Image (cartoon, rainbow, N blue to C red):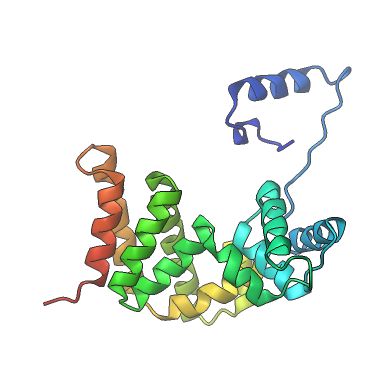
């Protein structure tokens, strides 16, 4: 169990956790942290083997970077990839890019890439696909997180930090950092900071009921990819 019971959404589980802590003489409470980084990569390789398939180390690393630390999502994506290849060969890096990048977080990453390249129609199309699959509030949160990380990465790059240092500072999987650095280089730090402030302003407008989250996202993407007159 996580050390902080607030990590659980269910109030009943938080209450149970607190009671268990108080009854230390009768209850043994162990902490099990979710696998991350190299540990998650290793877990993916093991799960694939258990399910009768195989991943290359690079493919497992890529999958770990795309799914974060969600073990259920990891198992789901492993099964999807093995089925995609009909268990005929080992899963390669390109397979992960083709199949798992269609998750919400993966799509947000590529959507931001489209924004950086000023590919308006493509970005808007990707946003509409995301809105069909995922709650608008979740997508908005992913946008905020992605641009916050890009600011950290861009700032680190300007200070001469290398990929390993950026991974350590951002606490991100090295695979994610490797994908994020080229994206960060497409923006100036001042541009990223301006985008982040705009997102915070939109968040404030959403909370005040001045604009719906869906419309805020569409407005943001449209404004981002419309050339200044």
Image location of residue 156, percent across then percent down = 50, 74
- Residue drawn at x 84%, y 21% is 24
Image location of residue 124, percent across then percent down = 31, 64
Tell me: residue 113, above or below residue 70: below
Q: Please indicate, yes or no, whether residue 160 appears anywhere in the rendered image.
A: yes
Q: Quadrant of the N terminus?
A: top right
Q: Quadrant of the C terminus?
A: bottom left
33 horizontally vs 103: left or right: right
Tell me: residue 190, above or below residue 102: below
- Residue drawn at x 34%, y 60% is 196
**Which of 119 and 227 lies nearest the eye of the viewer?**
119
- Residue drawn at x 34%, y 71% is 122
94 horizontally vs 204: left or right: right
**Which of 36 and 26 lies nearest the eye of the viewer?**
36
View extreme (left): residue:
229
**Which of 217 and 34 lies nearest the eye of the viewer?**
217
Tell me which corner region of the image, top left, top right, bottom left or bottom right, holds residue 127: bottom left
Image location of residue 203, percent across then percent down = 31, 47
Image location of residue 137, percent across then percent down = 39, 45
Q: Please indicate, yes or no, whether residue 166 appears anywhere in the rendered image.
A: no
Q: Number of labelled discs? A: 0
- Residue drawn at x 30%, y 54% is 217
């Amino acid at each position: 169990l996580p050390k902080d019971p607030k990590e659980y959404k269910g109030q009943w589980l938080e209450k149970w956790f607190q009671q268990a802590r108080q009854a230390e003489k009768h209850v043994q409470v162990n902490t099990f942290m979710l696998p991350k980084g190299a540990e998650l990569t290793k877990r993916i390789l093991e799960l694939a083997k258990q399910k009768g398939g195989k991943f290359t180390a690079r493919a497992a690393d890529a999958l770990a970077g795309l799914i974060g630390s969600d073990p259920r999502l990891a198992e789901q994506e492993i099964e999807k990839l093995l089925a995609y290849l009909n268990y005929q060969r080992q899963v390669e890096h390109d397979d992960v890019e083709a199949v798992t990048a269609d998750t919400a977080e993966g799509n947000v990453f590529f959507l931001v890439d489209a924004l950086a390249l000023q590919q308006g129609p493509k970005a808007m199309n990707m946003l509409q696909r995301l809105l069909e699959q995922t709650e608008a509030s979740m997508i908005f949160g992913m946008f905020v997180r992605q641009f916050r990380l890009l600011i950290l990465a861009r700032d680190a790059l300007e200070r001469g930090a290398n990929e390993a240092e950026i991974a350590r500072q951002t606490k991100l999987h090295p695979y994610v950092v490797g994908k994020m650095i080229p994206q960060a280089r497409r923006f100036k730090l001042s541009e990223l900071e301006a985008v982040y402030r705009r997102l915070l302003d939109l968040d404030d407008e959403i909370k005040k009921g001045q604009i719906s989250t869906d419309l805020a996202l569409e407005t943001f993407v449209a404004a981002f990819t419309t050339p200044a007159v």
